Amino acid sequence: MKAHQYQVTVYEGILDSTHRAGQTQDRLYIHGQGVLGYRDNGGKIDFFGYDTETIAEAMKAVKGSPNTEEGVRYLGEIELPDDVVSRLVSAGKSLNQAKADFEDAARTLVDLLK
């Protein structure tokens, strides 16, 4: 399966943004499936996104659109094993759902504590 690699500069907070002290995050856009964001330093996986906004941002980076935000660098197209991509997509979607379920349950618990 083909995928596109690109890098973006991410800022953890307002101070980082103000001082232009961002970190480079690698992203992998898997056509029709989603975007994996990760950093090589420490093997940190940041997210797996498949919402419309995330896909649109990825497509801008891939196309080299002049509207693409500063700090985006397209690295090229690569071929990935279908089975690995399928596992990633399935696990990423499950992880996102589990996170949403956890946050909902935690909010309910916090509301009960009030």
Image (tube, rainbow, N blue to C red):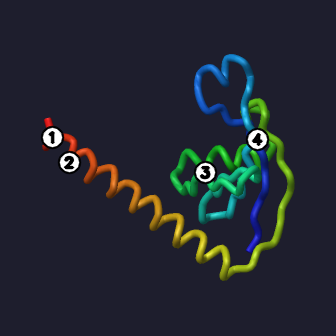
User: Callout 1, which amino acid?
Assistant: Leu
Q: Earlier in the sequence, mark 3 or mark 1?
A: 3
Q: Are marks 1 and 2 in contact (CB under 8 Å)?
A: yes
User: Callout 3, which amino acid?
Assistant: Asp
| Helix, strand or loop status at disc 3 | strand
Residue at the limit of the structure toward the top, as seen here = 18
Q: Earlier in the sequence, mark 1 or mark 4?
A: 4
Find residue 109 and name its label: 2
Residue at the limit of the structure toward the right, as seen here = 76
State the CA–CA distance, disc 4 to disc 2.
Answer: 36 Å
Left or right of 25: which side holds 33? left
Query: Where, by quadrant of the figure, is residue 4 drawn?
Result: bottom right
State the CA–CA distance, disc 1 to disc 4.
Answer: 40 Å
Find residue 113 and name its label: 1
How many marks the image carries: the answer is 4
Which residue is tagged 3? 46
Residue 32 placement (x, y as % from top left): 62, 64
Quarter holding the N terminus is bottom right
